Amino acid sequence: MAASETIVHLSKKLIPSAMHLNLAANWNQTPEDWERILKLEPEGCFGLFCDGTLVSTTTAICYKQELAWVGMVLTDPAYRGRGYARILMERALEFVAQRGVAWVKLDATDMGRPLYLKLGFEDEAPVERWMAQAPAEIRPCDLPIYEPNHTLDLEAFGACRCALLSTLATVEAVSLPGEGFAMARPGSRAAYFGPCVTRTPEAARRFLQWFLARHPRELVAWDILPNNLEAVRLAKEFGFERRRELVRMVRPGPSAFGPFAHNDSYVFAIAGFEYG
């Protein structure tokens, strides 16, 4: 790299600069999302400076040894085409390899997918963002406060993300004993519904009603794995429209053995493109 280009670990003081990249890309993350990622995996958050300006980022969160999730792959539009995303992706993959993580996943935009294919990722499943304006009035759905169900989440997601769920639960979260849970949080452009993990569409409906009742007239975003046909049906029923299409991609690490086990039929909303 040229002398004016430097890779650093991201820190809290760089969040305003990172948010500039978010806003330029029209992404929905907030400063609190960045802070959450930094707390979860401080050694896996990378930034690239060019002439003293933060122009590119990439993060990698390790869910113990089973899975690493790559996200926040952002480059300032004025600095695209210089290979910065690839440089940071390679650094993130080195970090994951050093941790001995078995699998790596990410949610790819059309712009990023060609790079990820070159780096050994393969398509796993489509991911879609659905959006709607919440109704002015919807019947409130009172639900119990969140109680962890890590066994169900492990079966659905395929890796232990207990630390992530614990921090998200401090924002908005509810659960139904034995059936699942749902969470929500603010976004820079829309209120965000997810993650939502449950065994039944009926429980997912109650979770969605709980969320919409708390955000009347707000623009809301909901990221769905469309292989879960019940989630798609529920989104259409409540007036959501498909706005973005991405591809979930997967890459085996050196310790990967057999297919990565997960159950998308339990995933009614992902946690976010940056979390999985």
Image: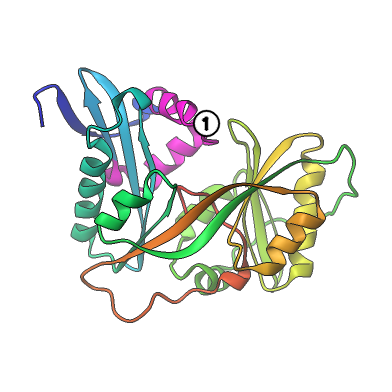
Identity of the residue drawn at 65% across and 35% down: 190
Q: Is residue 233 left or right of residue 146?
A: right
Q: Is residue 191 left or right of residue 77?
A: right
Q: Nearer the viewer, residue 64 or 80?
A: 80
Image height of 147 relative to 239, above or below: below
Name the residue carrying label 1.
26
Q: Is residue 30 magenta?
A: yes
Quick check: can you spot residue 143?
no
Quadrant in the rendering for residue 67: bottom left
Q: Is residue 26 magenta?
A: yes
Q: Nearer the viewer, residue 259 or 118?
A: 118
The total number of labels drawn is 1
Q: How far from the left and from the top, in percent, is residue 156? A: 54, 71
Q: Secondary structure at mark 1?
A: loop
Q: How far from the left and from the top, in percent, is residue 146? A: 67, 57
Identity of the residue drawn at 44% across and 27% down: 19
Q: Amino acid at mark 1?
A: Asn
Q: Main secondary structure of the magenta part?
A: helix
Part of the protein shown in magenta: 16-45
Q: Nearer the viewer, residue 113 or 224?
A: 113
Q: How far from the left and from the top, in percent, is residue 113? A: 37, 51
- Quarter occupied by the N terminus: top left
Q: Nearer the viewer, residue 28 or 144?
A: 28
Q: Is residue 166 left or right of residue 172?
A: left
